[in-house]
Image (cartoon, grey):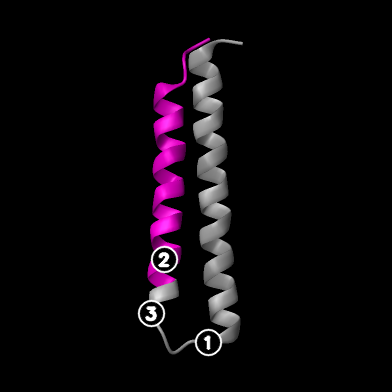
Amino acid sequence: MNPLSRRASSIRTLGNVALVAGFLVSAITLSTDIGTREPHILAGFLVATGIGLRIEAAISEPRA
């Protein structure tokens, strides 16, 4: 396997983990406590990071 392809795959996986974590934080916070904003800000940062990592992996992945 090509090292660049392996790197892109790792970055994509990390992006997926960040997206899932952000959505879970948001869902758990909505179901338990609506009063505070901090968990929603954390969830937003995690989702934005996940999207950014996915885009970076798509850009840096070598063409076939």
Q: Which quadrant of the view contains residue 30?
A: bottom right
Please determine whether, in this image, residue 43 is positioned above or below residue 54.
Answer: below
Residue at 41% of width from left, 63% of height from top?
Answer: 44
Query: Could you classify mark 1 by the number of other residues whose Cα lies within 10 Å: few (under 14), some (14-19), or many (20 or more)?
Result: few
The residue wearing badge 3 is 37
Residue 64 rendering spot, x and y as whole percentages = 53, 9
* Quadrant (top left, top right, bottom left, bottom right) of the N terminus: top right
Q: CA distance from mark 3 to mark 2?
A: 9 Å
Q: Which mark is residue 33?
A: 1
Q: Which quadrant of the view contains residue 46?
A: bottom left
Read off the magenta span: 40-64
Residue 57 rendering spot, x and y as whole percentages = 45, 30
Query: Could you classify mark 3 by the number of other residues whose Cα lies within 10 Å: few (under 14), some (14-19), or many (20 or more)?
Result: few
Q: Which mark is residue 42?
A: 2
Q: CA distance from mark 3 to mark 1?
A: 10 Å
Q: Secondary structure at mark 2?
A: helix
Q: Secondary structure at mark 1?
A: loop
Instruction: Give the amino acid at mark 2.
Output: Leu
| Magenta stretch holds residue 25 | no
Q: Secondary structure at mark 3?
A: loop
Instruction: Give the amino acid at mark 1.
Output: Asp
